[in-house]
Image (tube, grey):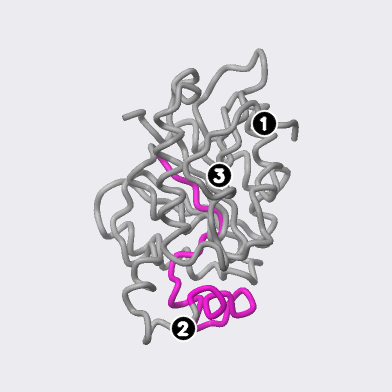
Amino acid sequence: MNRPDGVVRYGAHPDQRVELHDPAEGSQPRGVALLVHGGYWRERFTLGLMRGLAADLVGRGWAVANVEYRRGASGPWPAPDDDVRAAAAAVTASGWRWSWGGPLVGIGHSVGGQLVLLASGELDSAVALAPVTDAGRVWAEGLGDGAAAEFFGAGPIELPGVYADASPIRRMPPGCPVLAVHGDADDRVPLAHSLDYVRLASGAGGSPVGLLEVPGLTHLGAIDPAAPHWEATVGWMAGAAVVR
């Protein structure tokens, strides 16, 4: 991925920034894709995880805003949630965003999917790739090598409000149309998490929520633009949202 065409800063911390990429020259502008990476809240995972998707989307005519946010020791909860909401607001208010028009579509992977779902009220539509939908379930199942214990410092019995606040499945309905994309070979966030989220969200009313279940897709495969789910995902993005 080439160097960004611009940067939006939405706070004083070095990680409170968004890398901006213009759509490819000569392409038909589609809208703005707001990318949010995963990594189970750990600082060593960065927005670089999303650069493959960013390059693909730029080539298809999407402007891309790749979000970095506070996490780990420098960003205890609710900092990641606050930051993604602030990043979406800063991008929306920027002249860069309105130079492209079209919908603002959030695309989050893993914990990034959690954050995009929580920020769905700021978006025109959202794609959640192998999302974390229930932080308490991450704790109970010991997922991500004990990621919830490491990040939150205690369990949902000790911190019930924190875990509820961090769980999209507890904050229904989502604020925009949602597509969850999940593979049945995912051993980092099991497919059952998205199945349960989509079932409950679909019964909550409001915006439509769908699921693309992908045979053989792994957790990291969800952010591979060469994987079999991606064409259908991009097609959904093009038709799901009406700009507010």
Q: Secondary structure at mark 1?
A: loop
Q: Nearer the viewer, residue 210 or 94?
A: 94
Q: Which segment did they paint magenta?
A: 125-152
- Looking at the image, which residue sits at the far left? 205
Label disc, if present, on residue 67 of the rendered structure? 3
In percent of width and height, residue 214 lies at 60, 56
Q: Secondary structure at mark 2?
A: loop
Q: Amino acid at mark 2?
A: Ala
Cα separation, mark 3 vs mark 1, equals: 12 Å
Label disc, if present, on residue 226 of the rendered structure? none
Visible in this render: residue 216?
Answer: no
Pointer 1: what residue?
A: 4
Label located before the other in sequence (3 or 1): 1
Pointer 2: what residue?
A: 154
In percent of width and height, residue 194 lies at 47, 63
Residue 239 lies left or right of residue 111; in this view the side is left
Q: Is residue 108 magenta?
A: no
**Which residue sits at x=73%, y=43%?**
226
